Amino acid sequence: MTVYSMDSFYKQTMKTYGPHFTLFLVVVFFILGVSFSAMGQGTNTPELVLNSNGFNVKKRSNFKLGEITETLERGLTLVHVLSPTSYEYLSFDTYGSEGQLEECTAYIKEMMADKVFFAILAHDSAVKGTFKNAKSLEQLGLSQLAVLKSREAYVMYYNNGEVYEAMDVNSLSRTLDNYTISGPEKFYFPKITYEFEPSNDRYIAHAGGEVKGIKSTNSKQALDENYAKGFRLFELDIITTADGKMVAAHDWGMWSRFTDFKGNLPPTHAEFKKHKIYGDYTTLDMDAINAWFAAHPDAILITDKLNDPVSFANKFVDKDRLIMELFSALAMDEASRKGINVMISQQPLLDIPGDKVNYLKVNNINYVALSRRIIRSQLDLLVQLRDHGIKVYVYNVNFDPGKDEKYVQENEIGLVYGMYADKWVFDED
């Protein structure tokens, strides 16, 4: 058997076939290059891990793309990968609003029509009972999503025009390391920004604000430190001692942990005054609250927990610098008749039948407190409140990973008026 080296093989072939062989090699390598490029579009994509957890698991759902992890909010989340280094995602609170499912479905139809790679994950609860428009989901090939029940986990991805679905009563995970990024390179969820005039009345110091890295102290030092930083609105949680005295504390369980108190709860007023939070921070009773606000005449108090407006307002140093979050129609009516500024809490607001804005206007309620977690499901209402000059402050800031003061400032202020904040970060560039 004769063995040729590649060099001798090439020379012998060129002698026989001449330049035609060179052209043949160019064509062959071009075809191979195209084939390898097409294959690499899937194999060179970063690993995508989809983790869905239902309500009962009590664990955050997320997706991981390469080295990046994004945690999800309640409902359904669409994840669109545009390139190995570019992605976008958007969550829809399909549990809180049927309109959110319609919006989500419209995006699904558009992306399927464009044949782009995308995924869907459920977190917490994506539906109350079952989806009412199950037929439209079935028509899109989402047969398992169509029958998804409350609190169940769900993962879907759409690759090369094919639907892949999985569901579980608790949780599930899928890892994709060979998928095809296809379709037009366009963003389906462009970032929406809202214009607003900067003002320090957009920020309420939550439970007095953070002091030396500690949250929810409701302490004098928290008021002092955050006043110096720029806050002028201060929330305090008002609860009562065993002998009926009003004091500032988030709840008795937290207060006992903060103070290492071992006695019966709630404590007496005298016991409350004896103990400092972590041994350093001074607790606030009504005398201390009044003394601090008297010494800071441009500061405004927002109360939480308490639903007895007249009793508290009669004890507070300046009713004109008091806004009370209230939790029942009876308490709000009582406060309005006494000229007390009312902030309606989330649940009574959502319970108002018919025209909510008109109800607030008629009852002279100019402030709303609600969770930033329901923003997606209440967009229409928030726009109405904003356009009618009703100031909405969102809480649950820092409650979800990545959803801190800076996130709310950059993404949600302007739609909502302000936030309950632990930190003052709003003069940072």
Image (spheres, grey):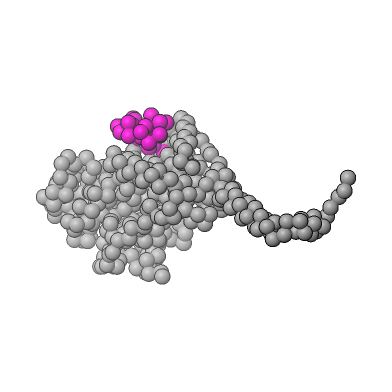
Question: Total marks drawn?
Answer: 0
Q: Which residues are magenta?
A: 124-150
- Please provide percent x and percent y for residue 381: 23, 49
Residue 125 forms part of the magenta stretch: yes
Asked if 179 appears above or below 234 in the picture, the reply is above
Q: Is any part of residue 197 visible from this angle?
A: yes
Magenta stretch prevailing secondary structure = loop
Q: Is any part of residue 330 visible from this angle?
A: no
Front residue of this view, candidates 245 and 18: 18
Q: Measuring 38% from the left and 44% from the top, which residue is drawn there?
A: 113
Q: Is residue 317 left or right of residue 222?
A: left
Q: Is residue 394 left or right of residue 210?
A: left
Q: Residue furthest right?
A: 1
- Please provide percent x and percent y for residue 348: 23, 42
Q: Quadrant of the N terminus?
A: top right
- Please provide percent x and percent y for residue 140: 37, 36
Front residue of this view, candidates 51 and 135: 135
Front residue of this view, candidates 206 and 371: 371
Q: Measuring 42% from the left and 31% from the top, which residue is drawn there?
A: 144
Q: Quadrant of the C terminus?
A: bottom left
Residue 259 forms part of the magenta stretch: no
- Please provide percent x and percent y for residue 421: 36, 58
Asked if 123 appears above or below 130 in the picture, the reply is below
